[in-house]
Amino acid sequence: MHNKIFETHAHYDDKQFTEDQDLLLKSLPENEIEYVINVGANLESTKSSIELADKYAFIYAAAGVHPSDVAELNADTFEWLKKQTENKKVVAIGEIGLDYYWDKDEQVQSLQRFWFSKQMELAKEKNLPVIIHSRDAAKDTQQMVKDYQKDNIHGVIHCYSYSLEMAYEFIKMGYYLGIGGVVTFKNAKKLKEIVAKIPLEHLLLETDCPYMAPEPNRGKRNSSLYLPYIIDTIATIKNISKDEVIDVTRENAKKLFLKF
């Protein structure tokens, strides 16, 4: 059985990869990584994600501005962002969303909501899925996703960290849950329960590398080469084969991002 993995959330343009970026990326296909989505978090990383996607056949890009960076958005920069979506390797708007963990200021949160909404509209206009970052902002994120449900926008809640009840709500609205290294942590009881209860058809594999390395590499630089630890954990929790985890999550990702 020749099983290929779809990595749905990486940041290979991060400075932690400066030294060995090309070497590492070239090693991914021979380690069964079939596709990678390199995700923009601000204007600069959107640009470098697209450059990576243009350079490597198996890499795709997401264009978007993370909630903590929305201060760099204005009419002009948003116009530039919009233009980036014309590149055929751009397969999603992301990562976008809300982060109230770092930003407690109501004015800042309000600005985050404004640009989250604008980027959801961009996804609707370009018929692209969204990659949503949401931290300590469950209620507002859910409301925003609900508000755009009629526009038939789909996507993934990256690094899912909320309740099981909310997980059911998101999948009902056509969203996937991104499962990464956290699921391997000993204290990740809530996430393990979610992985046990939510059907595999609604889960995607991701690393968020260079961050969030799974056990036994916790605290080290993460990469897609560590995805097997996440796959093993999901297979164990669900009592299914690793092949099934790889195959189903790959099909989910292809359907969402590559439309086949």
Image: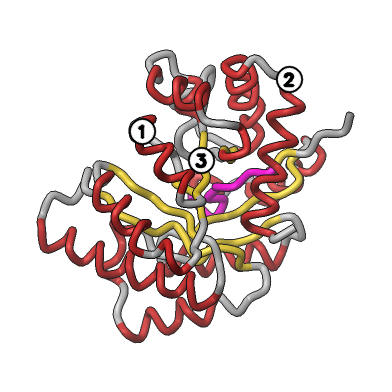
Q: Which mark is residue 178?
A: 3
Q: Which residues are magenta?
A: 6-15
Residue 25 vs residue 113, the one in the foreground: 113
Give the label on residue 241, or none: 2
Quadrant housing residue 169: top left
Q: Report the amino acid beneath label 1.
A: Glu
Q: Which quadrant holds the N terminus?
A: top right
Nearer-the-camera pick, 161 or 186? 161
In the figure, residue 145 lies in which quadrant?
A: bottom left
Quarter of the rendering occupied by the C terminus: bottom right
Q: Is residue 174 above or below residue 216?
A: below
Query: Which residue position is annotated with label 1?
Result: 165
Q: In 3D space, how far apart are the residues under numbered discs 3 and 2 (Cα atoms)?
A: 19 Å
As rendered, which of 226 and 194 lies closer to the eye?
194
- 10 within the magenta span: yes
User: Pointer 2: residues within 10 angstroms few (<14), some, or many (20+)?
Assistant: few
Left or right side of 136 for 62:
right
Whether residue 224 appears in magenta in the rendering, the answer is no
What amino acid is found at the position of numbered circle 3 in the picture?
Answer: Gly
Q: Position of residue 117 (x, y in %)?
A: 32, 68
Please rate how many residues cluster around mark 1, counting C-alpha atoms within 10 Å: few if below 14, some from 14 to 19, many from 20: few
